[in-house]
Image: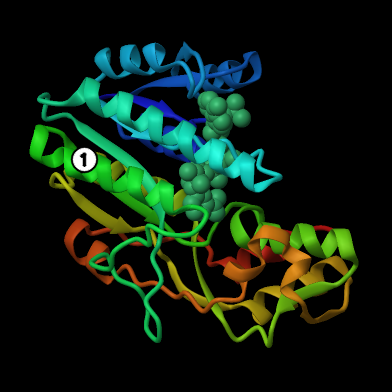
């Protein structure tokens, strides 16, 4: 398949592009800068110049391809307004891509986070929360899945809180950044709350499987570690960076404070059983051993 890919230079997207190419697919990658275009070309992808706001470019990318993989998100978010803008930008991009694909039966794979199910690991059958600061992202994903009734083989891969590669990325990456900034490897509360995680190379394998196999309107969990206790994550970060480890207030993590405090394990039992996906790369705690002071 020729797969039009947005976000193909990101932490999640770079290994996804490599995985698709390795499996014999071709990739047309959206690039908003010379640096992104060069990275995609070096990876072996074709380049389509433009950004998420360029809806005509997105439509032409989808029109020229057999499938769409959407992974771009503008994470340059400092304020609540920035987040609102990024969420709206992504929603408009997904809508444009979906309208182009309607009636074509082509795969359209997008991304979200795993949901939270109080007291147990969330499953692929649990709904995404549509309230809160990123509720708009969930509504956009829901609109993509609803395209199943309009002739699109739509699917969503739900990523855990941390997608990691060489010790970097996700919530654990933000926790590491806060530790470097404050001089303390802090965990909000007692740190017994659990966050799920996956290695970016394992997530990449699932994006390929979902593009190739997933029935229309389905959601999948790219979860390798069901739930790492946050104090265990902070302990590795502190040891690797030579910093003390202790409980800190949620305000240390700014807009992420509340969500960092929540217990939010997730399972991928259904995804593994149906798609035959099997994570093979190091878990988060092992991968964090690659951190350098
Ligand atoms: N990493 C995680 O732990 C994690 C966890 C859960 C969910 N997710 C979600 O997974 C997706 C991919 O995340 P990631 O970690 O790979 O993000 P990332 O490393 O920040 O990469 C973002 C990608 O989006 C592209 N992009 C950003 N703004 C764009 C714009 N305006 N126009 C075109 N392209 C734009 C970037 O291109 P440039 O090269 O030009 O910057 C880059 O390729 C996102 O939806 C993210 O929210 C990630």
At 21% from the left and 40% from the top, the residue drawn is 154
4 vs 246, left or right, is left
Q: Is 59 rendered above or below residue 236?
A: above
Residue 64 picture location, percent across and down: 27, 12
Residue 226 picture location, percent across and down: 43, 74
263 vs 104, left or right, is right
Residue 195 picture location, percent across and down: 53, 72
Residue 86 picture location, percent across and down: 54, 37
Quadrant of the image occupied by residue 6: top left
Which color scheme did the rendering employ for the protein? rainbow
At 13% from the left and 41% from the top, the residue drawn is 148
Q: Is 23 rendered above or below residue 32?
A: below
Residue 267 visible to an observer of this rendering: yes
CB of mark 1 near ligand 1 (< 8 Å):
no
At 66% from the left and 42% from the top, the residue drawn is 77
124 vs 115, left or right, is left
Residue 203 visible to an observer of this rendering: no
Quadrant of the image occupied by residue 175: bottom right
Label 1, on which residue? Answer: 154
Q: Secondary structure at mark 1?
A: strand
Out of 190 and 267, give the one closest to the viewer: 190
Q: Residues within 10 Å of mark 1 (few under 14, many from 20)?
A: many
In the picture, which quadrant includes the N terminus?
A: top left
Quarter of the rendered structure image containing ligand 1: top right
Q: Is 5 rendered above or below residue 267?
A: above
Q: Is 128 rendered above or below residue 99?
A: below
Quadrant of the image occupied by residue 21: top left
At 39% from the left and 29% from the top, the residue drawn is 92
């Amino acid at each position: 398949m020729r797969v039009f890919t947005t976000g193909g230079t990101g932490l999640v997207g770079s290994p996804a592009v490599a995985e698709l190419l390795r499996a014999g697919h071709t990739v047309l990658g959206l690039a908003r800068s010379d640096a992104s275009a060069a990275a995609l070309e070096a990876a072996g992808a074709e380049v389509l110049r433009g950004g998420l706001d360029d809806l005509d470019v997105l439509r032409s990318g989808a029109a020229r391809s057999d499938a769409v993989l959407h992974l771009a998100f503008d994470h340059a978010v400092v304020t609540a307004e920035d987040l609102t803008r990024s969420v709206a930008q992504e929603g408009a991009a997904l809508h444009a891509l979906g309208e182009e694909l309607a009636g074509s039966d082509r795969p359209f794979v997008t991304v979200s986070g795993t949901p939270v199910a109080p007291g147990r690991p969330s499953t692929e059958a649990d709904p995404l929360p549509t309230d809160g600061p990123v509720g708009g992202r969930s509504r956009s994903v829901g609109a993509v899945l609803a395209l199943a009734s309009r002739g699109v083989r739509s699917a969503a891969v739900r990523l855990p809180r941390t997608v990691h590669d060489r010790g970097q990325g996700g919530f654990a990456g933000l926790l590491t950044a806060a530790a470097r900034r404050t001089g303390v490897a802090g965990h909000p509360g007692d740190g017994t709350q659990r966050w799920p995680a996956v290695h970016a190379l394992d997530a990449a394998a699932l994006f390929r499987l979902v593009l190739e196999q997933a029935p229309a309107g389905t959601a999948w969990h790219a979860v390798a570690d069901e739930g790492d206790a946050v104090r265990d994550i902070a302990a590795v970060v502190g040891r690797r960076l030579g910093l003390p480890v202790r409980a800190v207030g949620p305000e240390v993590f700014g807009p992420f404070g509340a969500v960092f405090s929540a217990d939010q394990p997730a399972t991928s039992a259904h995804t593994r059983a149906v798609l035959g996906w099997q994570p093979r790369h190091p878990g988060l705690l092992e991968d964090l051993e690659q951190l350098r002071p």
